[in-house]
């Protein structure tokens, strides 16, 4: 499969927070402490950050969410990362706990998000970066600048193509966002990229997506328009400059960012690996316990191949879950 001029980039959403397996009663309580929060001045904005410390860790990993997801969406991921790393999460300037600190009258581009990420990498002295869905664009743009600190990166639920399913999703999304049609926006996310989520998560997801601030819908609309106008070649040339090992993970059932399309990155990036999470859709490890475990195993095998096993806190679907899926994730 060759990349054509019409090919562009897309992805979205990320996922929720909670725990899964009730028979797993062992807890790593030393990793359950509340994170250190801070508002960091980066570029022209103030960014809400959360630092999950591990006194024994030798590396720090920074997590890059999708466009409208927030730090709360990383609760599941932090569960299996914190026993091995210091973990940094942050909200984009227009979303979550960052939004109140910023003037959101102007839209933010993916190029700006990439520069913001580079500055946060330096601020927290991060060694590894991991992105989810639409956060993959800003992450790959940042990695193309070859930040000296970053040793490896993981890119989840992302591909270099806008296929027919994704284009249909985006164009319908544009219509609903333009009309600020909250009900249709919430249903669209759950019926497409969120189709494999548990029903409980779908209910919380709908509540979250349909209740966003109007500016967040406008920012979402701006990002979709930016994606649809992308020149694939210009971005691909930038991505080809990436010189560190990358792991791409995609869900087997995800028709929006498919595992086969993700493998097109091997035409450009010399040192990359690919993993397909079985029986999982776009939201991968949020969808069921086996996908959560398989995602964790693949990620840690890539980042720390010589690691000693450490039991992470289990994942339990509960009413405390925090929804995070978004139109362009």
Image (cartoon, rainbow, N blue to C red):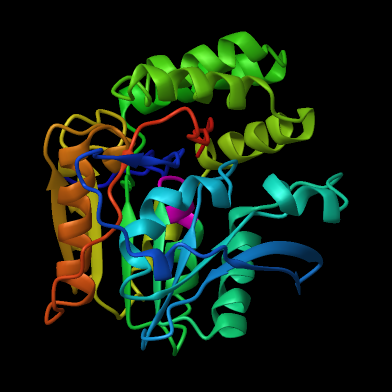
Of residues 314 and 9, the one nearer the viewer is: 314
**In magenta stretch: residue 212:** no
Question: For the point 52% across and 23% down, which residue is it?
Answer: 204
- Magenta stretch in the rendered image: 133-137
| The N terminus lies in quadrant | top left
Q: Is residue 270 above or below residue 21?
A: below
Quadrant of res 121: bottom right
> Where residue 273 appears, x then y in whole percent?
15, 64
Q: Is residue 84 left or right of residue 172?
A: left
| 101 left or right, relative to 305 | right
Does 255 sit above or below residue 115? Answer: above
Is 134 inside the magenta-drawn segment? Answer: yes
Q: Could you say which is closer to the camera, residue 85 or residue 9?
A: 85
From this viewpoint, which residue is outermost toward the front? 25
Residue shown at 60%/75% (left/top)?
120
Q: Position of residue 281 (x, y in %)?
A: 25, 31
Name the spot of residue 84 as percent of width and height, x first.
31, 75
Q: Main secondary structure of the magenta part?
A: helix
Left or right, 114 with respect to 253, comes to: right
Residue 182: percent from left, percent from top = 66, 14
């Amino acid at each position: 499969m060759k990349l054509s001029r019409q090919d562009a980039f897309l992805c979205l959403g990320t996922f929720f927070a909670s725990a899964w397996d009730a028979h797993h009663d062992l807890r790593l309580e030393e990793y359950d402490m509340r994170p250190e929060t801070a508002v960091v001045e980066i570029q022209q904005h103030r960014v809400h950050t959360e630092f999950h410390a591990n006194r024994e860790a030798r590396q720090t990993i920074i997590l890059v969410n999708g466009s409208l997801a927030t730090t709360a969406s990383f609760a599941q991921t932090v569960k299996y990362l914190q026993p091995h790393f210091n973990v940094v999460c942050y909200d984009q300037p227009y979303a979550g706990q960052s939004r109140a600190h910023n003037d959101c009258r102007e839209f933010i581009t993916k190029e700006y998000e990439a520069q913001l990420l580079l500055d946060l990498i330096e601020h927290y002295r991060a060694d590894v970066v991991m992105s989810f869905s639409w956060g993959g664009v800003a992450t790959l743009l940042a990695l193309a600048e070859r930040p000296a600190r970053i040793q490896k990166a993981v890119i989840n639920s992302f591909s270099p193509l806008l296929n027919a399913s994704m284009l249909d999703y985006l164009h319908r999304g544009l219509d609903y966002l333009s009309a600020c049609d909250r009900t249709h926006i919430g249903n669209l996310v759950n019926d497409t990229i969120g189709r494999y989520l548990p029903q409980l998560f779908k209910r919380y997801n709908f509540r979250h997506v349909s209740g966003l601030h109007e500016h967040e819908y406008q920012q979402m609309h701006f990002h979709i328009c930016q994606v649809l106008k992308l020149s694939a070649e210009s971005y691909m040339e930038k991505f080809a400059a990436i010189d560190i090992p990358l792991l791409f993970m995609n869900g087997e059932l995800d028709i929006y960012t498919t595992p086969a399309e993700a493998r097109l990155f091997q035409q450009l990036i010399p040192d990359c690996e690919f993993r397909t999470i079985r029986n999982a859709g776009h939201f991968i490890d949020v969808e069921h316990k086996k996908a959560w475990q398989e995602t964790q195993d693949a990620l840690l095998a890539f980042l720390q191949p010589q690691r000693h096993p450490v039991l992470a806190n289990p994942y339990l679907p509960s009413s405390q879950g925090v929804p995070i899926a978004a139109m362009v994730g």
